[in-house]
Image: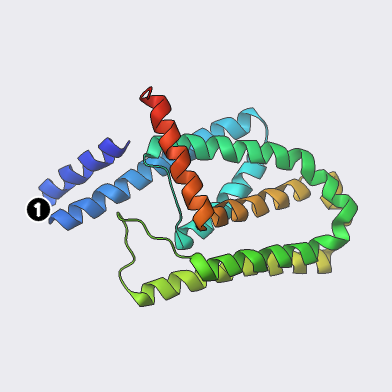
Amino acid sequence: MDRAGQALGEWLGAMFDWSEEDREIAAFSLTLILSSAFFIGLLVLLSVTFRVFLEAFAMALTSGLLRTFAGGAHLSTGWRCGIVSAVAATSFAIASRYIGPLLGAISTALPVTAVIVALIIAAFMAKYAPVDVPEKPITSDRQRRRLRTVSIVLPIAWGCGFAAWLHFGSPDIAIGRTLLGSIWLASIIGLMWETFSVVPPGIRFVRWLDQHIGRIIHHK
């Protein structure tokens, strides 16, 4: 996948006579597109197989949207990222499917819970986001401030929006008897998963995991 992105970037660069920097940017962007397509395809396959597509979609949506602005740690190859992310997302989606309906019993506490979780995530984003990578560095303080602002606003908007929906809609029965509780829980896990990838312990864990996967692959 990484080699394919690199090869396509070099091919386009030679065709349009791009500079070395432009070729590197193109290679990184193409690799990102290919790895994202692989992740989405594998996630759809796994989530449909285990009948948790909606939960997996909610988790991938909130995590992916926040990651677009906050950045975060990632594994060293697109294959590793895609496989680990899809398996983890499906596993959390399955857990959400079974735990979500139980939230109906505490539905009155969910609006406050949503706001508290959103504020905690926003606080972590204010301190640590955005996390850039060498292939796509943040080039100015203005860009960094803009990315950090959006990273803070997104979880707050999610928390307040859900709290308002619960307050005015009062879907207590729906939370317990439909997939709404499961989807809400999966969306929380998505935000928390992305938050974990921007804090120092999460970054260290991802590096550790990447090293161990590499050793297993190369039998070291």
Q: Judge the density around disc 1: few (<14), some (14-19), many (≥20) Cα neighbours within 10 Å.
A: few
Residue 98: percent from the left, percent from the top?
77, 38
Q: Is residue 165 left or right of residue 63?
A: right
Q: Residue furthest bottom?
A: 142
In the image, what residue occupies the spot 67% across and 54% down? Answer: 188
**Circle 1 SS class:** loop
Residue 75: percent from the left, percent from the top?
42, 43
Q: Nearer the viewer, residue 106 or 200?
A: 200
Q: Is residue 144 left or right of residue 189?
A: left
Residue 23: percent from the left, percent from the top?
19, 51
- Asked if residue 6 is positioned above or below residue 64 in the image, the reply reads above
- The quarter holding residue 93 reads top right
The colouring scheme, among rainbow, by chain, secondary structure or one colour, is rainbow
Number of residue marks = 1
- Asked if residue 138 is positioned above or below residue 49 in the image, the reply reads below
- Asked if residue 58 is positioned above or below residue 49 in the image, the reply reads below
Does the image show residue 175?
Answer: yes
In the image, what residue occupies the spot 54% across and 66% down? Answer: 125
Q: Amino acid at mark 1?
A: Asp
In the image, what residue occupies the spot 83% across and 50% down? Answer: 103
- Please state, as top left, top right, bottom left or bottom right, where the C terminus lies in the image: top left
Does the image show residue 197?
Answer: no
Q: Mark 1 highlights which residue?
A: 17
- Please state, as top left, top right, bottom left or bottom right, where the N terminus lies in the image: top left
Residue 91: percent from the left, percent from the top?
64, 36
In the image, what residue occupies the spot 76% across and 66% down? Answer: 163
Q: Is residue 74 left or right of residue 51?
A: left
